[in-house]
Amino acid sequence: MAGGMTLGDLCRLKGQETNTLQGLGLVVGLRGTGDGDSAPTGRALARMMQLMGGPMSVDAVGNLNLTDVEDAKNVAMVFVTAKIPPVGAQQGDVLDVSINAISAKSLDGGFLMLTPMLGPRADNPTVYAMAQGRLSLSPDTPATTATIQGGMKMESNVRASYIKDSKITLIIDRDFADFTTAQRIEDEINSEASFTMGDPNQSRLSSSRGNPSGSGTRDVYAQAIDQLHVEVMIPSLYRENPIKFISLLLEIPIQLANRSKRVVINESDGVVVIGDDVEIAPVLITHRNLRIEAGGGGGFVEIGPDGSPSAAKLKSLADALGALDVPTEDLIAIIKTLKAKGDLYGEVIFQ
């Protein structure tokens, strides 16, 4: 059993997600690596110069004359994006922005002109922030990608909305999400024993109502919606102070079902974590010049609890392979083969 964990370690509130602001801007000051004779870039540049009071000529029907800017080789149209943290952002906050070229060859030396930043929905023209500044390029990224540290200033508040219809929704971390965990969280929240503070008839999260004898129906409850979501009603006692309720809720201790039947593999870092209860069927493994018998009674390297033909522990197999100096990438390949063959009794998770 997992110990010392609380709901706050396993869950987050729905509504506390990272949001994206986006804009379409112009980068100037390039070294001949801009968009060249791109018509959209020319129109955007001409329009910006007109709004700033620049002397722009127009044709017979009043449209801007793009011939004035057709030779601008040092300008590029770019996509500008920024991440709003899960806690939201307040007016005046400054955040980093990312810049990606549309057709420019390089953004080196560029400067982003003042760019309005909109929300992720194209049908909502609300300007939430403004971005501008000198571009910084990283040697590890293409020359068409850049960033501006603190390049966006919030013009309005973006708040995390996590209460709807007097309910909050807990979203279980995907590393723990399953039906058993969701049901366990529901039971723990609805269990009076989890909430009492010395008085077994009174919960710190809810009030009781009912007959004069003191028994009644609790107006706080949780309901598991699926393996990822648990809805929790905010009690009437805390409707005016939901933050207090949420803080108490996330402090509830929780014990999870045994996770020892899992294998977690991080191939990029060469890390393999094997649970104690992961078993494999009796198999004979041939690896290059090695032959390993697991769970059988042969005469090779026998891997099993007592030499019986019952299922062997994957951990014991890994120990034997390690003693034979088998590389981690080969251990991972063997685990993949065992799982594909159906001879590994447990869950394999790749990160």
Image: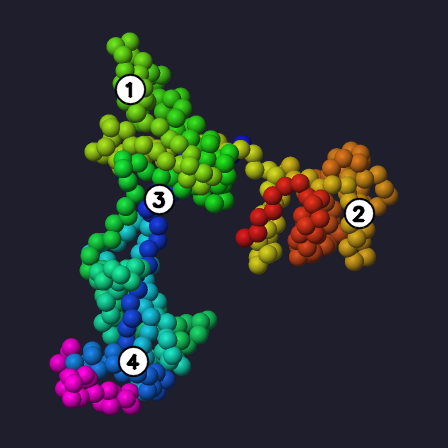
Mark 3, residue position: 14
In the image shown, does 151 or 284 lie closer to the viewer?
Answer: 284
User: Judging from the image, what secondary structure is the residue with disc 2 in?
Assistant: strand
**3 vs 2, front mark:** 3
Q: Quadrant of the N terminus?
A: top right
Q: What is the crowding at mark 3: few (fewer than 14 residues within 10 Å), some, or many (at least 20)?
A: many
Q: Is residue 106 above or below residue 118?
A: below
Give the left or right position of residue 3, taking residue 344 as reference: left
Mark 2, residue position: 284
Q: Quadrant of residue 248?
A: top left
**Sequence-first tag of 3 and 2:** 3
Chief SS of the magenta region? loop
Q: Quadrant of residue 238?
A: top left
Q: How many marks?
A: 4
Q: Residue at x 45, y 43 (%)?
A: 173
Q: Position of residue 336 (x, y in %)?
A: 67, 52
Q: CA distance from mark 1 to mark 4?
A: 65 Å
User: Judging from the image, what secondary structure is the residue with disc 1 in?
Assistant: strand
Give the left or right position of residue 310, taking residue 144 as reference: right
Mark 1, residue position: 208
Mark 4, residue position: 41
Q: CA distance from mark 3 to mark 1?
A: 27 Å
